[in-house]
Image (tube, rainbow, N blue to C red):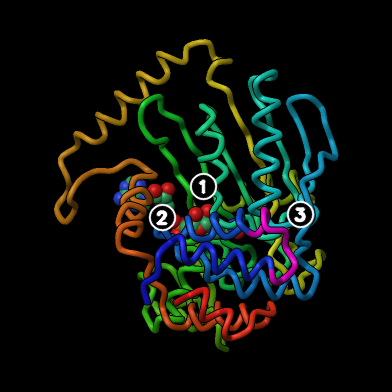
Amino acid sequence: MQISADKLTAFISRIFVTAGASAAFADEVAVHLVAANLKGHDSHGIGMTPAYVHNIRTELLKVDAEAAVIRDNGAVMVVDGQFGFGQVVGRQAADIAIERVRDTGVVCMGVRNCHHLGRIGTYAEHCAAQGLVSLHMVNVVGHDPQVSPWGGRERRMTTNPFACAVPRADAPPVVLDMATSAVALGKVRVAYNAGNRVPEGALVDYEGAPTTNPAVMYEEPFGALGPFGKHKGYGLAVMCELLGGALAGEWTAQPENHRSHHIVNHMFMCVVDPQAFGGVEKFQAEVDAMVDYLHSTTPAKGFDRVRVPGEPERESMALREADGIPIDDATWTGVLKAAEAAGLSTDEITALVE
Ligand code: NAD
């Protein structure tokens, strides 16, 4: 099916309100999830709704929790998300960092105990909108690992995302935002739901052999996601685990830590005010010149043009804002079931989505 962003946002927000969230928080989460769909990341879009509703009902996700500063050492801060909506407490943490960085020039913040933060680039874009550079290293805990280390068979980590944004004066920011697994787990879920294969090199089966069948993540005998970029992607994933998990969250994927059916993100976030470097104009001129230089590259065979990170998401957004957001049947069925589980009647659901 195809649905407009506005209608989808109103529906998803209503699900969270019915499940117990305030209208403001429900709207913020719905806007974030639908924006992920608009930007082409269906893995982190409204398909997460069933998991969120489940976690609200089991009280693993606290609908009214807010970010709380638990350590304040000037440019170094630790914020506890208290298992609130990641979209809310993650943005609140970013706001705290944005306010502080005007005094300190740089803020290194540990953001811990957030229910799923969703699309990490959202927080990088939030900082970039204020003219700030930011870097985000995240781990994921609360459930069994899904990603095997480079050279290994068993799962030891999760998809540990990394994001970084560089603002531009008169253009959208450059935004790198990615899982450190070969693909995001949600993309495997979307492929599984749609009966599609995943790209080669993304998955291994239970013997560690490469496979393109997403079922290895959901049906026995289980396989694993692999890291992107062989040992280098694995290395970046380890650093996300150690900085996001050990330093910011004091909770890594190692087996002594508890694993329930939870989705918890810890984030190491570094926010930098380019003003503190003293030469914002020169910085921006160099960014623009370098982006132009990259864009001027002759496309390789099979490519239409060279892009910088963040552009594919803006292209997807333009298309989906115009045409609506495509949702596969399995994802939509899951969302409808979540709406019922939250407490919406069939008539209410019909009125919201038709
Ligand atoms: P992806 O592989 O689609 O994109 C990764 C990055 O590459 C993006 O910044 C994109 O702009 C850039 N890119 C893509 N094609 C490009 C091109 N041709 N030229 C230049 N740049 C290009 O992303 P992914 O790894 O599948 O991650 C998807 C999302 O999942 C991300 O938003 C991430 O934050 C999110 N995620 C979240 C969690 C969590 O626990 N909250 C875990 C994993 C991933």
Instruction: Please name the residue that numbered disc 2 is placed on.
Output: 39
Residue placed most toward the observer, 310 or 203: 310
Residue count near mark 2 (Cα–Cα under 10 Å), binned few <14, some 14–19, many ≥20: many
- Within the displayed image, which quadrant is ligand 1 positioned in? bottom left
Residue 207, image x, y percentages: 52, 81
Residue 183 visible in rendering: no
Tell me the mark number nearer the camera, choosing from 2 and 3: 2
For residue 113, the mark is 3
Alpha carbon separation for disc pair 2 and 1: 11 Å
Q: Amino acid at mark 1?
A: Gly
Which class describes the residues within 10 Å of circle 1: few (<14), some (14-19), or many (20+)?
many
- On the image, numbered disc 1 is attached to which residue? 121
Asked if residue 229 is positioned above or below residue 306 in the image, the reply reads: below
Q: Residue at x 70, y 41 (%)?
A: 93
Nearer to us in this view, 128 or 272: 128
- Residue that appears at 45% across and 74% down: 190
| Residue at mark 2: C-beta within 8 A of ligand 1 | yes
Residue 91, given in percent of the width and then of the height, sits at 64, 44
Residue at mark 1: C-beta within 8 A of ligand 1: yes
Q: Earlier in the sequence, mark 1 or mark 3?
A: 3
Per the image, label 3 sits on a secondary structure element best described as strand
Quarter-wise, where is residue 51 in the image?
A: bottom right
Q: Give the magenta part as a residue range.
A: 18-26
Give the image location of residue 284, x and y in percent: 40, 20
User: Which tag, 2 or 1, sits closer to the chain's start?
Assistant: 2
The correct choice, above or below, for 5 with respect to 49 in the image is: above
